[in-house]
Amino acid sequence: MPERTTLSSWVRGMVLAIELEGLDGRALFAELGLDYAALDDPDARFPQDDMTRLWQLAVQRSGNPAIALNIARVHTPAFPVVGYALMSSRNLAEGFERLERYQRIIAEGADLSFRRQPEGCLFSVQVHGDRLQPARQSAECSLASLIGLVRWITGRQIRPLEVQLAGEPPRDVTPYAALFEAPLKFGQTHCAMLFSHADMDAPLPTANAELARLHDRFAGEYLARFESSRFSHQTRQVLCRLLPQGEPKREAVAEALHLSERTLQRRLQEEGSSYQQLLDDTRRELAQQYLATPHMTLLEIAYLLGFSEPSNFFRAFRRWFGVTPGEYRERGAR
């Protein structure tokens, strides 16, 4: 299965955020064996697991677990066409819908979701790795970048109604409170921001329907070329959405992708995967992420992964990791 990758322009933004902490980005790349010169190649991409290693090293060197929040001060577009498409949208809601549509161009490891709810509009991000569990800074970087971008575009100090953050609260939450200026909820399964409908529906000063259509065309063409060889990630996104409803049947996934079951299986085989392998891999990765959230019970995790019986989840988990879910969680807590 192809490893998830991140576009060089987004990685450049990460490096700028790290360097704002006083670190030497070039030296960190050299230590990790990464190609610093590739940051200047607009088509270059970096493996998601290498981005996890970069965040881990940056936190270790700086001693600042909130280092990813620095990206709110960086206004380098993660992917110019996507950034311009957002800016030319009628309002932020339309811009966020475009961001969700084209996110895979920027980073395959991140699943973005924008949903209207009665209490407000929820923008959420969930990051996945290949061999390594993603650093919490990856998702926090996305939220920080977005809040900085919307304030810059609108010229207003937009404040979320609520910010949800994965993992336990850090010792010092001051940087989070200072940036988001909103109620913070730690210990969530993924990161998200809840915005008011009024903020999302207010006209953007940069709106331009003709430019929005032009950027849609460019981004759509790029995404079509990119997805032609990255179909497994698209299938994985559907699985993540369907799993809480029970084990997804191949037929339901094919229908969600507007394909026949035969075409689904053929396209996965072309990428060296299969439906059952992808389902198993997706469950394994989500299990790791859910177990890192202390307040989630093993029963809740089993059902979120689509297992009809907890015993089926325990058997699968022992096959994946050689230990029980409880033992795995205890090891992570040490």
Image (tube, helix red, strand yellow):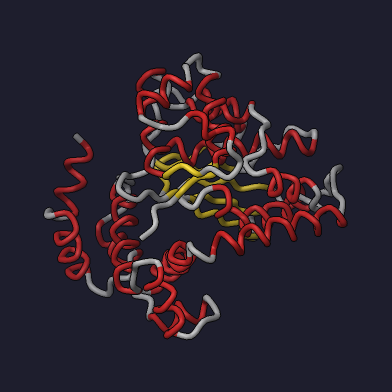
Query: What percent of the width, then of the height, locates residue 118?
Result: 65, 60
Q: Quadrant of the C terminus?
A: top left
Q: Quadrant of the N terminus?
A: bottom left
Residue 333 in the figure: left or right of residue 224: left
Query: What percent of the width, then of the height, locates residue 317?
Result: 19, 60
Name of the residue lying farthest toward the left: 322
Name of the residue lying farthest toward the top: 22
Residue 120, visible in the rendered structure: no
Nearer the observer, 180 or 26: 26
Nearer the observer, 330 or 29: 29
Nearer the observer, 27 or 138: 27
Q: Is residue 28 above or below residue 167?
A: above
Q: Which residue lies at the image location 48% right of the left edge and 25% below the top edge?
A: 67
Q: Which residue lies at the image location 72% right of the left edge and 56% below the top edge?
A: 218
Q: Which residue lies at the image location 53% right of the left edge and 42% below the top edge?
A: 44
Query: What percent of the width, then of the height, locates residue 296?
Result: 32, 52
Which quarter of the picture shows residue 258?
Answer: bottom right
